[in-house]
Image (cartoon, rainbow, N blue to C red):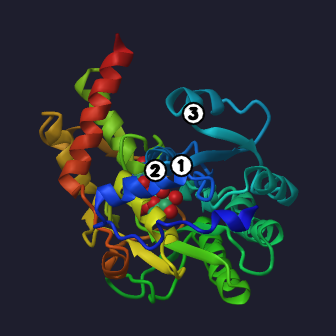
Amino acid sequence: MQAERTQKPCRTHTASDDDYFIAACHLIERTSSLYPMPRALITGITGQDGQHLAEFLHEKGYEVFGLIKGQNNPKIEPLLAEFPYVRVVSGDLTDFSSLVAALRTVQPDEIYNLGAISFVAISFTQAELTSNVTGLGVLRMLEAIRLVGGEKSNPIRFYQASSSEMYGKVREIPQNELTAFHPRSPYGVAKVFGHHMTVNYRESYGLHASSGILFNHEGPRRGYEFVTRKISSSVARIKLGMQDKLLLGNMAAKRDWGYAGDYVKAMWLMLQQEVPDDYVIATGETHEITEFLQLAFECAGLGDWHKYVGVDKQYFRPAEVDLLVGDATKAEKTLGWKREVDFPSLVEMMVRHDLDLEAKRAK
Ligand code: GDR
């Protein structure tokens, strides 16, 4: 069953491939019994990246399945309202047998493991849970792939969401695929474990398993707990008179911020290569949080951000990642990937979106 799905005509794409070629390939896949629609299983489908990826894969002609945990999970209804084509499968990254059952049901061609406790700050107070979901969850999924896909010529392709947080206290600037890791949070440590497990299963069992070392990526679908969305939504609320102040932690941190919509394309491109590998996905620029603040407040016509922003110690972390900037040369050369949205456009996109959203909510 699985083996038939591996004979895809569309493997080894670069982003520069002609759109007509891609459309033709998927038409063939959909209309030919030899080439049924490819199936993708996404963990973490209710998060920012999961939503972008579901949309992207659906447009490419995939059947999209989302692994969702828990009983009567309240995130299912809004997910299906926005993405009615997604098929929900029950399962939990902390439960091996549920992953095996999900893989048997879906028979996926591609698995995108985006599920994680992804908020770095909370990983300090929930270190064990973070290690279990974000770290051991990767191992469970790899084992489930081995069991369901078979020991030889396993047809399931696997994407692991690795993170720039693995670099932590950075050993070199910029960071590339060969830069040593020095994680600074339980989240970063768990991601290093998942990353090395992915490499290990690729080398030990020949799995088509790739890791994307994604630097920070944002957008209007970002959760409110992350600094960029916290800023864009607060700016909108201040502009509309719904909030007076914005309180932040360490504003001296520097990040390499890209647009999440650009980054999910890189995930897909990795799984279309003949040979699995690891890739840094980043913009190559770093910006201090104060720069994000300046652009965001200016975009809303509020002027100097200092008037509105204060410091609250509760938002400082026990150990901080001071500076991240990635070198995505390998992805650009091998995958043909390139970011499309630059930093000022990203800030503007988020602020404009939140101005509209908050205005609607205020009515
Ligand atoms: P990060 O993102 O930890 O880089 O991880 P986050 O937006 O949470 O923090 C970025 C930087 O901003 C500083 N900061 C604050 N952060 C938050 N959330 N809230 C504040 O009030 C605040 N004030 C200052 C932080 O200290 C930090 O330096 C994100 C997540 O998406 C991870 O899952 C992912 O792996 C990495 O990006 C790449």
Disc marking residue 27: 2
Could you tell me the amino acid type at mark 2? Answer: Leu
Label 2: state its secondary structure.
Answer: helix
CB of mark 3 near ligand 1 (< 8 Å):
no
Q: Position of residue 268 (x, y in %)?
A: 47, 62
Could you tell me the amino acid type at mark 1? Answer: Arg
Q: In this view, does 359 lie to the left or right of 68?
A: left
In terms of sequence position, does the residue under pointer 3 or pointer 2 come before the other?
2
Q: Is residue 306 visible?
A: no
Q: In which quarter of the image is residue 161?
A: bottom right
Q: Mark 1 points at which residue?
A: 30
Q: Quadrant of residue 81?
A: top right
Q: Is residue 127 left or right of residue 78?
A: right
Q: Name the residue under label 3.
A: 79
Residue drawn 69% across the image and 62% down it: 127
Q: Position of residue 235 (x, y in %)?
A: 28, 35
Name the outermost residue toward the right.
97
Q: Position of residue 122 (x, y in %)?
A: 60, 54
| Marks 2 and 1 close (CB-CB < 8 Å) | yes
Q: Quadrant of ligand 1?
A: bottom left
Classify mark 3: residues with Cα within 10 Å, few (<14), some (14-19) or many (20+). Answer: some
Classify mark 2: residues with Cα within 10 Å, few (<14), some (14-19) or many (20+). Answer: some
CB of mark 1 near ligand 1 (< 8 Å):
no
Label 1: state its secondary structure.
Answer: helix
Q: Position of residue 143 (x, y in %)?
A: 79, 71
Cα distance in 3D space between marks 2 and 1: 5 Å
